[in-house]
């Protein structure tokens, strides 16, 4: 979907000013939010793509103005409400009022470190062979979908070169809407910055793009 999350190439936000020696957490509540969200994700009632799409559905004035961890906890509250893990009254009261709903798993403190270190594997087996290979010239389709999409808007209609094939992965566009993993082939494409942004530059940029976003030029 065309939402506030797709900021690449947008003007009017001023220069990016990285914070020198930025701490992992600016406030103690951010640390607590990370712990809460990790614990809730372990319940197995949603996936990372559902959460991403939930965040990008917030209005632009909220998405662009609230702190990252604030947006993260608000998205979790939405999915928790939708799945009956919490009620509106409990959110307002700040404590449990009804018996808890059973979940698939509970994340114990001693399991957090090993779980994060292990990561998550998203490589799958696709139903078809890849259409492209390294060295191919490929054009990005001009897609404007209503649902979740991992295609940066600034690459629509641009032509690039395949530089790497990453096998098939879980397709976020399907996974975010409960339509299954629908594995799709994933490629790294290289583009010329001058062609993407009409910039006076010899720089290249690379992006990982799924096969349904691509077509032969």
Image (cartoon, helix red, strand yellow):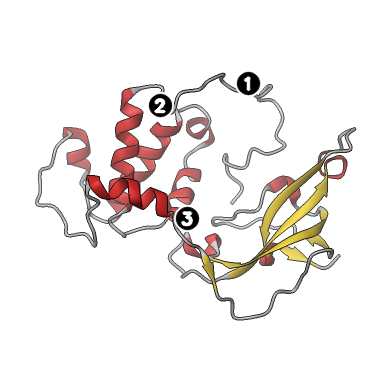
Horizontal and vertical percent position of residue 162: 78, 60
Q: Nearer the viewer, residue 31 or 198?
A: 31
Q: Residue under circle 2?
A: 25
- Looking at the rendered image, the disc whose residue lies closer to the viewer, 3 or 2, is 2
The reply to whether discs 3 and 2 touch (Cβ–Cβ < 8 Å) is: no
In the image, residue 9 above or below residue 111: above
Q: Residue under circle 1?
A: 17
Label disc, if present, on residue 128 of the rendered structure: none
The reply to whether discs 3 and 1 touch (Cβ–Cβ < 8 Å) is: no
The numbered mark, 3 or 1, whose residue comes first in the sequence reads 1
Q: Nearer the viewer, residue 149 or 21?
A: 21
Say which residue appears at 60% left-offset and 53% top-offset: 150
Q: Nearer the viewer, residue 72 or 59?
A: 72
In the image, residue 65 above or below residue 153: above
Q: Residue under circle 3?
A: 49
Quadrant containing the C terminus is: bottom right
Say which residue appears at 78% left-offset and 69% top-offset: 133
> Alpha-carbon distance for marks 1 and 2?
18 Å
The numbered mark, 1 or 2, whose residue comes first in the sequence reads 1
Horizontal and vertical percent position of residue 43: 27, 56
Mark 2 neighbour density, 10 Å: few (under 14) some (14–19) many (20 or more): few
Left or right side of 211 for 173:
left
In the image, residue 156 above or below residue 162: above
Mark 3 neighbour density, 10 Å: few (under 14) some (14–19) many (20 or more): many
- Looking at the rendered image, the disc whose residue lies closer to the viewer, 1 or 2, is 2
What kind of element bears circle 3? helix
The numbered mark, 3 or 2, whose residue comes first in the sequence reads 2
């Amino acid at each position: 979907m065309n939402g506030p999350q797709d900021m690449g190439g947008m003007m009017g936000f001023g220069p990016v000013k990285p914070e020198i020696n930025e701490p992992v957490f600016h406030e103690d509540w951010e640390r607590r939010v990370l712990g809460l969200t990790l614990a809730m994700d372990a319940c197995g009632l949603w996936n990372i793509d559902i959460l991403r799409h939930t965040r990008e559905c917030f209005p632009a004035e909220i998405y662009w103005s609230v702190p990252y961890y604030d947006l993260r906890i608000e998205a979790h509250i939405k999915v928790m409400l939708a799945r009956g893990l919490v009620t509106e009254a409990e959110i307002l009261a700040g404590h449990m009022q009804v018996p808890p709903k059973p979940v698939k798993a509970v994340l114990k403190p001693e399991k957090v470190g090993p779980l994060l270190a292990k990561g998550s594997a998203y490589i799958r087996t696709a139903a078809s062979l890849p259409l492209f290979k390294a060295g191919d010239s490929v054009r990005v389709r001009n897609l404007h979908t209503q649902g979740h999409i991992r295609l940066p808007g600034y690459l629509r209609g641009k032509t690039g070169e395949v530089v790497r094939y990453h096998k098939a992965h879980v397709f976020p566009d399907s996974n975010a809407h409960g339509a299954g993993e629908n594995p799709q082939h994933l490629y790294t494409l290289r583009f010329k910055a001058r062609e993407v942004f009409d910039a006076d530059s010899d720089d290249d940029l690379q992006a990982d793009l799924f096969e349904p976003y691509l077509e032969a030029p």
